[in-house]
Amino acid sequence: MLALFETLFDIIRLKKGPDAIPYSWALCLIAMTLWLASGLVATILTDGMTDQHFLVGTFTGVVALACYAGILVTDGRIPRLLQTMTAILGCGAVINFLLIAADVFLSAFLGARISGLAALLLLLWSIVVKGHIISRAIDRKLLAGIVAATAVFALQLYLYLLLKPAAAVTA
């Protein structure tokens, strides 16, 4: 398990690609579980988030995975699909947990503005990471992957805003 996290951190730092992850359904299931857990933890710890936010976020995440899978299938890279999905889910989970830490700890010690800035930078970095994963999976330049990841992120944001989860009512 430690080796998986080391590999995910290497991918997040753009030092390795999805090919560094073993072809394993079990690892993909672990990555998916971590990804869902990070969404649940974020929902629980973030003020104003409800179960609707979690469901809409999960839905838009699944749409993004389908888009990335479509890119690989269209490019004829089906054998790389499992490793790529594992990398996207695993790196997404790690970045989500870093976002949670930034929100909880940075806002407590440095304020909401610094926490918000850190969250924005992590979110932008996650687009670069996903672009890196896709570019390595389809053997293209990083810029092509970043363009694809940006388009997928824009679609996710559009769907999220379209479905607009209701804000939590606090008494």
Image (spheres, helix red, strand yellow):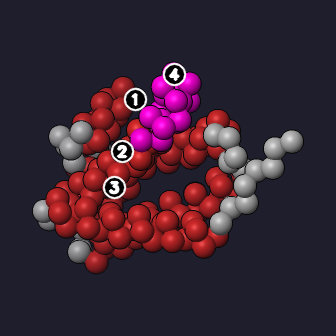
Tell which of 4 and 22 is nearer to you: 4
Tell which of 30 and 46 is nearer to you: 46
**Mark 2 residue element:** helix
Q: Please give the range of residues in magenta.
A: 98-117
Which of discs 3 and 2 lies nearer the camera? The answer is: 2
138 displayed left or right of 152: left
Which of discs 3 and 1 lies nearer the camera? The answer is: 3
In the displayed orientation, state which residue is furthest to the right.
171
The majority secondary structure of the magenta stretch comes to helix
Name which quarter of the figure residue 69 lies in.
Answer: bottom left
Closer to the N terminus: mark 3 or mark 2? 2
In the displayed orientation, state which residue is furthest to the bottom.
74
Q: Position of residue 74 (x, y in %)?
A: 28, 78
Amino acid type of the residue tagged 2 in the rendering: Leu
**Residue 127: mark in rendering:** 3
Give the spatial CA distance, label 3 vs label 2. 10 Å
Tell which of 122 and 35 is nearer to you: 122
Name which quarter of the figure residue 81 lies in.
Answer: bottom left
**Residue 109: mark in rendering:** 4
114 displayed left or right of 57: left
- Residue indicated by mark 2: 121
